[in-house]
Amino acid sequence: MRRTIRWSVVAVVSLGSVVFQGCPIDLLGGLLSNCLGGDTISEREYDDLNILEQLLYEENDCDRYERR
């Protein structure tokens, strides 16, 4: 039983490092840059833009708009 658990832990740790190596987790940094970044505008500012300028922006996860 202990041998099975030990090998399971070794397999999960080794596979986890391979699978998640190219997928860095930076939740707080990503959240702050998307929601409070200097390159985003609010919905009110977005509505003030003309139609052609609005095409240059897209809505992000924080209901703010950033350049495409």
Image: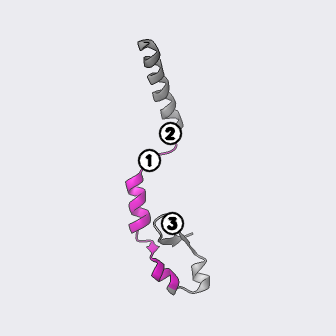
Q: Which mark, by number, is residue 60?
A: 3
Decide if residue 2 is on the left or right side of residue 57.
left
Q: Amino acid at mark 1?
A: Ile
Identify the residue shown where x is 52% and y is 34%: 18
Q: Earlier in the sequence, mark 2 or mark 1?
A: 2
Instruction: Answer few, some or many: residues within 10 Å of disc 2's Cα (few below 14, many 20 plus, some between 14 and 19).
Output: few
* Mark number displayed over residue 25: 1
First in sequence: mark 3 vs mark 2: 2
Q: Are marks 3 and 2 in contact (CB under 8 Å)?
A: no
Label 3 sits on a secondary structure element that is loop
Q: CA distance from mark 2 to mark 1?
A: 9 Å
Q: Report the span colored magenta.
A: 20-47
Q: How is the image coloured?
A: one colour
| Nearer-the-camera pick, 51 or 21 | 51
Name the residue tied to disc 2. 20
Amino acid on which disc 2 is placed: Phe
Look at the image and tell me in which quarter the C terminus lies: bottom right
- Figure check: 42 above or below 30: below
